[in-house]
C-alpha cells in the first residue's frame, strides 16, 4: 500500500475532516497518531477504527493553542511509533462575526489555533520528520474567495497558512520534505453541517451545487502524503466543488 511503514500525525483527528484523514491514511497503510481537544470518547472510537484497519493508533489530548502540548504530541508520536513521516495540520476553529465588533480575545484565540498552532506543530515536527516527509495543512476556500461579510478573522487566519506553506517548502525542500496546503470548500462536519442555517447559500456558491464529504478532502491529503506527489511542494490544492471557480 502507498503508505506502508509510514507514521502520520493528524491534529484534530477525532471528528470531521481530521477523522476522515486519519482513517484514510490508515487505510493506505500508515500508523496514525492524532490530537483532539475535548472529546476523548470520539477519539477512542477513531483509535478503534484505525486498529480495525490493522494499523497502530494513538490519540493524544493536546490543545493546538498550547505550544507545550503540541510539541509533546509530536514527541509522543515519535516515542510510540519510532519516527514521523507525515504531519497533517488539520485542527482549526471557525469564527463568523462582524469585523468592527470582533472581540480581541477571539482574535487571539482563533490565531492561536489556526496560525500559531500550525506554526508550532510544524516546527516541532520538522525536527523529527524523516527525509522525504510530508507536511500538509488544511486551509480554507475563504483564502481564495470570501463569500460575504463576517469572515475577516477566519479568512485572516487561513490566509496565513499560504505564506507559511510556501516559506516552509523552501525551508525543507533540501530534505525532500514537501509542504502543501489543501483548501476545502463547504464540507459536511460539525463545524459546517450540510443542514445548517448557511448551508444552502454555501452549496449555491460551488460549481457542483453541493457540500463536500470529509472523505473527499482526505483523498487529496492521501495523494499529497504519497510518493506519487513527490514533485508537488509549496502548492495549494482546492477541494471545494468549484467554490473559487
Ligand atoms: P470540526 O469542528 O468538525 O472538527 C474539529 C476537530 O479538531 C475535532 O477533532 C476537534 O477535537 C479538533 N479540535 C478543535 N479545536 C482544537 C484545538 N484547539 N486543539 C486540538 N484539536 C482541536 O472541524 P472540521 O472537520 O470541519 O474542520 C477541520 C479543518 O478544516 C479546520 O482547520 C477548518 O478550519 C477547515 N475547514 C473546514 C471547512 C468545512 O466546511 N467544514 C471548510 C474549510 C476549511 P474535539 O472533538 O476534541 O473537539
Image (spheres, rainbow, N blue to C red):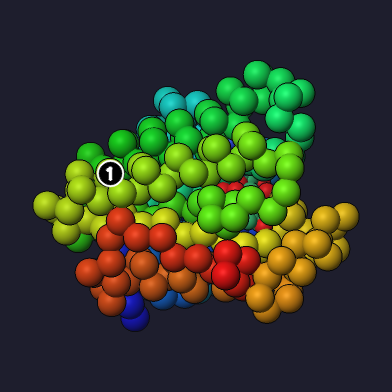
Question: Residue shown at 62%/34% (left/top)?
Answer: 153
The percent coordinates of residue 4 (x first, y second) are 31, 73
Question: Residue shown at 43%/44% (left/top)?
Answer: 161
Question: Residue shown at 38%/33% (left/top)?
Answer: 120
* In the depicted structure, whether residue 29 falls above or below residue 80: below
The percent coordinates of residue 158 (x first, y second) are 52, 44
Viewer-nearest residue: 25 or 17 = 17
The percent coordinates of residue 195 (x first, y second) are 85, 63
Toward the top, the furthest residue is 104
Question: Residue shown at 71%/30% (left/top)?
Answer: 99
Viewer-nearest residue: 203 or 225 = 203
Is residue 45 visible in this depiction of the protein?
A: no
The answer as to whether callout 1 falls within 8 Å of ligand 1 is no
The percent coordinates of residue 34 (x first, y second) are 49, 50
Question: Which residue, given by chain and number where applicable, does mark 1 sit on?
Answer: 167
* In the depicted structure, whether residue 108 falls above or below residue 16: above
The local secondary structure at tag 1 comes to helix
Quadrant for the C terminus, please.
bottom right
**Classed neighbour count for the residue bearing mark 1: other residues with Cα under 10 Å, few (<14), some (14–19), many (≥20):** few
* In the depicted structure, whether residue 178 falls above or below residue 150: below
Quadrant for the N terminus, please.
bottom left
Counting every numbered tag in the picture gives: 1
Viewer-nearest residue: 37 or 135 = 135
Locate residue 76 relative to residue 206 in the image: left or right: left
Figure quadrant of residue 26: bottom left
Figure quadrant of residue 212: bottom right
Toward the left, the furthest residue is 174
* In the depicted structure, whether residue 32 falls above or below residue 148: below
Locate residue 191 relative to residue 128 in the image: left or right: right
Is residue 89 visible in this depiction of the protein?
A: yes
Amino acid at each position: 500500500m502507498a503508505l506502508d511503514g509510514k507514521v502520520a500525525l493528524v491534529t484534530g483527528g477525532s471528528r470531521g475532516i481530521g477523522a476522515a484523514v486519519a482513517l484514510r491514511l490508515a487505510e493506505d497503510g500508515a500508523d496514525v497518531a492524532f490530537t483532539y481537544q475535548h472529546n476523548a470518547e470520539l477519539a477512542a472510537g477513531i483509535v478503534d477504527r484505525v486498529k480495525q484497519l490493522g494499523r497502530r493508533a494513538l490519540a493524544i489530548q493536546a490543545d493546538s493553542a498550547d505550544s507545550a502540548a503540541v510539541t509533546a504530541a509530536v514527541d509522543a508520536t515519535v516515542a510510540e511509533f519510532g519516527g514521523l513521516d507525515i504531519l497533517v495540520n488539520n485542527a482549526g476553529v471557525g469564527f463568523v462575526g462582524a469585523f468592527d465588533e470582533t472581540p480581541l480575545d477571539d482574535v487571539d484565540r482563533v490565531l492561536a489555533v489556526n496560525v500559531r498552532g500550525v506554526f508550532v506543530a510544524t516546527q516541532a515536527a520538522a525536527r523529527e520528520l524523516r527525509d522525504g516527509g510530508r507536511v500538509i495543512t488544511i486551509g480554507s476556500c475563504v483564502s481564495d474567495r470570501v463569500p460575504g461579510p463576517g469572515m475577516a478573522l477566519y479568512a485572516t487566519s487561513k490566509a496565513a497558512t499560504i505564506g507559511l506553506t510556501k516559506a516552509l517548502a523552501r525551508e525543507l525542500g533540501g530534505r525532500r520534505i514537501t509542504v502543501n496546503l489543501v483548501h476545502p470548500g463547504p464540507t459536511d462536519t460539525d463545524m459546517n453541517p450540510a443542514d445548517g442555517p448557511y448551508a444552502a447559500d454555501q452549496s449555491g456558491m460551488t460549481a457542483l451545487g453541493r457540500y463536500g464529504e470529509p472523505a473527499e478532502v482526505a483523498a487529496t491529503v492521501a495523494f499529497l502524503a504519497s510518493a506519487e506527489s513527490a514533485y508537488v511542494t509549496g502548492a495549494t490544492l482546492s477541494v471545494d466543488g468549484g467554490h473559487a471557480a
